[in-house]
Amino acid sequence: MNRKLPPGIISIIVISLLIGLFLLTSNLNNPQNVEDEGDAKIIISLNFGEKILKEVMVKSGISVIDALKSVANVSLAYGGKFVVSIDNISSDLKEQRDWFYYVNGFLANVGAADYIMHPGDVVRWDYHCWKTLLVNSELQDFPYMFTKGYSNKTYPLVVAYEPTFRNEAEKIYNFMKKSVTVNIVKIENLTREILERNNVILLGKSSKLVEEINSRYDELGWKYHLSGDYVVDIHGKKYRGAFAQITQSPYNSKGIGACENILLLIAGNEEYVGTVVDILLNYKIDSFWLMEGEPL
């Protein structure tokens, strides 16, 4: 029988289809959909994330090494606890290049056979040179260091800002409050206790705290740092710009290898900080760090 549906029913069907399409698109574009599936992700990359070789979903509940072996050809040493080759790319002692693995942005502090992957974890194996930089955390897998943490443990987040960067700080606050417990304060209201016990995102250029952290760039394994009004890279090249770089908190009494809390610094010239924040919040980071600016 050919019956015509009432206009109201047709409208409901159309709206339902549109909502379903919207939710599907949102899940595809949202990095958090890893956790929705109860699975984890393995990423294999080169040169501090600049080239992605493989990105594969795996089952959680298994060790990182078992997950890696399920998606790549792997050679091991030292009783099967040290990865010397992935898909025929091998450790190079002369060039001081090795494979390092990061869990939700943290350089892991246990062997790959000992870390059990949790639902939603993003584990990145990156092949890079450690001669110049020993990078204890990476920004490319933002925001998992804040939303998933390490070994399924997260810390509250504090967003702190210099007055010039209030709008950018509020944008980050509004973005992060959907996923984590977060507060927003002026930088001068930060205490050592807050720095020790929380994840912290700092936005600034000239406050004493920003200058203090920036002065430790070499210890923290950062590619960029501020020098007066300029951003300077590890080769001494100067830029007018701004950067975002991340580290395991240097204020944690257990040290920057504790795999506990994270500090993210966004610093530089006012006209570039907004661009850096937009790139960060739109998941367009293409390496372990983020810098926008003009070379001088």
Image (cartoon, helix red, strand yellow):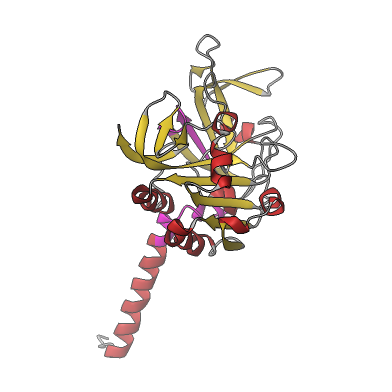
Give the image location of residue 142, x and y in percent: 50, 47
Q: Residue at x 49, y 64 (%)?
A: 174
Residue 149 drawn above or below residue 180: above
Quadrant into which the N terminus falls: bottom left
- State which region is magenta: 26-53
Q: Residue at x 44, y 56 (%)?
A: 165
The image quadrant that residue 122 belongs to is: top right
**Of 21 and 94, the residue lying toward us:** 94
Give the image location of residue 244, x and y in percent: 46, 43
**Of 285 and 248, the residue lying toward us:** 248
Residue 110 seen:
yes
In-image side of 174 versus 250 (left or right): left
In-image side of 253 versus 21 (left or right): right
Residue 120 seen:
no
The outermost residue toward the top is 94
Residue 134 drawn above or below residue 7: above
Q: Residue at x 53, y 64 (%)?
A: 178
Give the image location of residue 36, x and y in percent: 54, 57
Q: Which residue is drawn at 27% across and 89% down?
A: 7
- 85 in the magenta segment: no
**Of 16 and 238, the residue lying toward us:** 238
